[in-house]
Amino acid sequence: MASADRLSGLADDLLQRILSFAPAKEAAASAALSRRWRPLWRRTGALNLDSRPYSRQHSRFYHGDRFDDFFRHGKAALASRLGTALKRLTLYLLEDAYLVGDKWHYRRNDDVVPEYDTRVAGLLADPAATALEELRIAGECAFVCMYVPPLASLSCAATTLRVLELHHCSFEPPPTEPSASLAFPHLTDLTVRDCTYLESYLQDVVDVMPALTRLALVDVINKPLTPPASFH
């Protein structure tokens, strides 16, 4: 006798809760199961955009458009919400997903400022993300540099964001983003884990978080304001 389909016996709201923890690519694939499943993943209040499944195996020296599908699918997933506001967004970025150009060029030229893919900021600025309450950004730095999140450009920062967690990022202001534009009036929980940070920037951010009740700095490294002389 075939085993019972226990998942299909669950209520829709519970299935949506389960799908909210799955990567968006896998959650979207559930739509092929049946007509009932088709809209479920689009009604969850959470979205997990993970670039790792899009990385080509054994492509160490490959540079180009391998993450185009990741950004296209990410935008499509954000645009696919069905009457449910997106409350939680998790973004996992491989170095080649956020870094533009040849990373070996950056390694050979220490004085070259890394350029980040603007499509990452585009995901964070998407209209579907304007009411986020929780945002988690994790990067994977293999060779060159950690990702610098454009915090001041977050459309949800001044209105709804309550929880912000950064993992393997560089907690510092992007060159085009002055700290004076920061505003996090509703943020209550800030976690910075396995990151480098500028102490002055961290203070700037905390100063614009009047509702902050929890600050967690886990395995962080204070980054000097100026690079060592050997880098010049």
Image: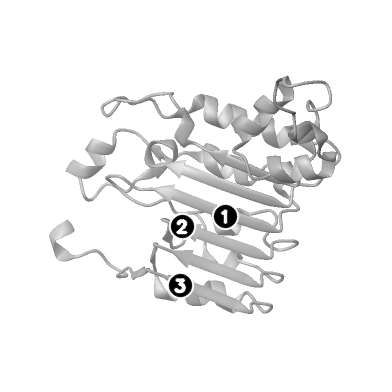
Evaluate if marks 1 and 3 touch, with contact meaning CB atoms under 8 Å apart.
no
Task: Determine whether, in the image, residue 127 is placed left or right of residue 52.
Answer: right
Whole-percent x, y for residue 94 in the image:
41, 40
Residue 200 vs 36, above or below: the answer is below
Residue assigned mark 3? 217
Q: Crowdedness of circle 3 by 10 Å Cα count: few (<14), some, many (20+)?
A: few
- Residue at 44 percent of width and 55 percent of height: 175
Quarter location, residue 189? bottom right
- From the viewer's side, name the closer residue of 145 and 40: 40
Q: Quadrant of residue 218?
A: bottom left
Q: Amino acid at mark 1?
A: Arg
Q: Which mark is residue 136?
A: 1
Residues at marks 1 and 3, CA–CA distance in whole angstroms? 15 Å
Asked which secondary structure carries label 1, the reply is strand
Q: Residue at x 33, y 69 (%)?
A: 221
Is any atom of residue 232 visible in this view?
A: no
Q: Which residue is mark 2?
A: 167
Q: For marks 1 and 2, give the CA distance.
A: 8 Å
Disc 1 crowd, CA 10 A, few/some/many (<14, 14-19, 20+): some
Are the residues flagged by discs 3 and 2 in contact, CB closer than 8 Å? no
